[in-house]
Image (spheres, helix red, strand yellow):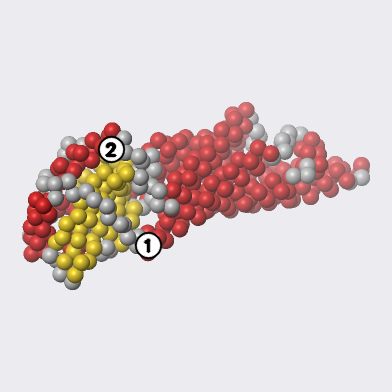
């Protein structure tokens, strides 16, 4: 960074560091239009995920128990005599649509790199799976109900034909259940779980929980399609896997609502502000060259951004910090030339690192750097803040 603007930044930082020993104070954080839009997506999607998960759990709990394809007469009687058969299936259709809304919001919360790509493919599987679920639940909830009632009210000489029609429709439902488990309960949540685990937005363990639940759903779908009838394994997986992924969606929905309400950041670890005698656009351009950071920041041993070049909305930065080691940051808010925020983990702490560029005059910019913990700061977060604050004070852009 040998430009005049870079020199101005370096000199201004030296003066600001000399004048301010700890650099911490309260600063109001402006919310950009794009960030505000994201927060609405997180709020709506979060509440949709919560409502869909709860509705899905309740719907499955009160769903009448049937004998399945092995005993069509017993199954038809349960369906025909049930007073809640149609309402339960309507509720489950709504639950799937709401859960899809939650998955859309999760997709929007994970951007850039491998995690963003996995979330995009997971979104495709979710849409296909939801469409399949609506078809299956419509057949099982409405067509099966009509055929079961027709069988129950049919004269004796027509009951065998009526039961055969119901049994054929029930076999179709069972056949559709296999790809539903494979695609929606399986592939969708495996991909979303991997995306969450590889991102810096959600706790890594939470992502692996979804992977485990999705793997169970996928295995259930494959086995059920192979043997063509229910088994003890598919019944166990058919209960465990949907329960895990539904509870996972409930938890992530709560996190999304917190993100949307602005409750994600609970503790400021480091905050520094200083003036630089350059226009805002020039200050942005100089600091957007992330690969050059190690040349003026001794606490950064290495920096790489993907895609290469100045930071952008889908940027993923990989850093080697002295002495905490390697960390990976994913862009979560991007509003050029006013601010960008990316999120990563360091010594087990999930943090947001915000860079703000505030125009003071046409030739003067205030730079504000804020490091926040995603949870109430504990010993590790305080240790990171102490070490980082001291090292950061020697940086000269």
Element under label 2?
Answer: helix
Residue 11 picture quarter:
bottom left
Near-viewer residue (196 or 47)? 47
Using the rendered image of the protein, determine whether residue 217 is visible from the camera's viewpoint: no
Q: Check the image and report above or below for 338 versus 17.
A: below
**Coordinates of residue 331 in the picture (x, y in percent):** 31, 53
- In this rendering, position of residue 329 left or right of residue 155: left
Q: Earlier in the sequence, mark 1 or mark 2?
A: 1
Near-viewer residue (103 or 50)? 50
Residue 85 picture quarter:
top right
> Counting other residues with Cα less than 10 Å from the Cα at mark 2, is it few (<14), some (14-19), or many (20 or more)?
many
Contact (CB < 8 A) between labels 1 and 2?
no
How far is the residue under mark 1 from the one under mark 2? 29 Å
Number of residue marks? 2
**Residue appearing at x 27%, y 59% in the figure:** 339
**Residue appearing at x 56%, y 36% in the figure:** 243
Residue 163 picture quarter:
top right
Residue that mark 1 sits on? 34
Residue that mark 2 sits on? 381
Using the rendered image of the protein, determine whether residue 360 is visible from the camera's viewpoint: yes
**Residue appearing at x 66%, y 34% in the figure:** 229
Q: Check the image and report above or below for 336 versus 121.
A: below
Q: Which mark is residue 382?
A: none
Q: Check the image and report above or below for 366 versus 136.
A: below
């Amino acid at each position: 960074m040998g430009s005049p603007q870079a020199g101005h930044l370096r000199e201004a930082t030296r003066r600001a560091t000399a004048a301010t020993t700890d650099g911490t104070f309260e600063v109001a954080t402006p919310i950009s239009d794009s960030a505000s839009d994201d927060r609405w997506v997180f709020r709506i999607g979060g509440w949709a995920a919560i409502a869909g998960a709860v509705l899905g759990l309740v719907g499955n709990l009160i769903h009448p128990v049937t004998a399945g394809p092995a005993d069509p007469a017993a199954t038809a009687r349960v369906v025909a005599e049930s007073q809640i058969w149609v309402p339960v299936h309507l509720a489950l259709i709504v639950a799937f649509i709401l859960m899809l809304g939650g998955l859309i919001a999760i997709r929007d919360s994970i951007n850039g790199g491998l995690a963003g790509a996995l979330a995009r493919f997971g979104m495709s599987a979710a849409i296909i799976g939801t469409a399949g679920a609506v078809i299956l639940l419509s057949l099982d909830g409405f067509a099966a109900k009509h055929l079961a009632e027709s069988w129950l009210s049919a004269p004796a000489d027509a009951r065998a034909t009526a039961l055969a029609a119901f049994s054929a429709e029930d076999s179709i439902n069972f056949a559709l259940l296999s790809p539903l488990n494979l695609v929606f309960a399986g592939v969708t949540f495996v991909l979303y779980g991997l995306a969450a685990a590889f991102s810096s937005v959600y706790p890594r363990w939470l992502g692996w929980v979804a992977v485990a639940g999705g793997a169970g759903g996928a295995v259930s779908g494959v086995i059920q399609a192979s043997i063509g009838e229910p088994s003890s394994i598919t019944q166990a997986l058919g209960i465990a896997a949907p329960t895990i992924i539904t509870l996972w969606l409930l938890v992530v929905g709560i996190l999304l609502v917190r993100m949307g309400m602005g409750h994600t950041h609970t503790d400021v670890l480091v905050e520094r502000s200083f003036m630089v005698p350059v226009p805002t656009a020039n200050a942005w351009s100089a600091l957007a060259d992330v690969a050059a950071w190690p040349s003026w920041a001794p606490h950064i041993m290495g920096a790489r951004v993907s895609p290469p070049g100045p930071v952008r909305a889908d940027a993923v930065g990989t850093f080697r910090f002295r002495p905490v080691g390697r960390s990976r940051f994913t862009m979560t808010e991007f509003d050029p030339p006013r601010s960008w925020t990316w999120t990563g983990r360091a010594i087990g702490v999930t943090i947001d690192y915000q860079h703000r560029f505030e125009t003071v005059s046409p030739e003067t910019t205030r730079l504000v750097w804020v490091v926040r913990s995603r949870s109430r700061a504990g010993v590790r977060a305080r240790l990171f803040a102490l070490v980082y604050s001291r090292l950061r004070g020697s940086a000269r852009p």
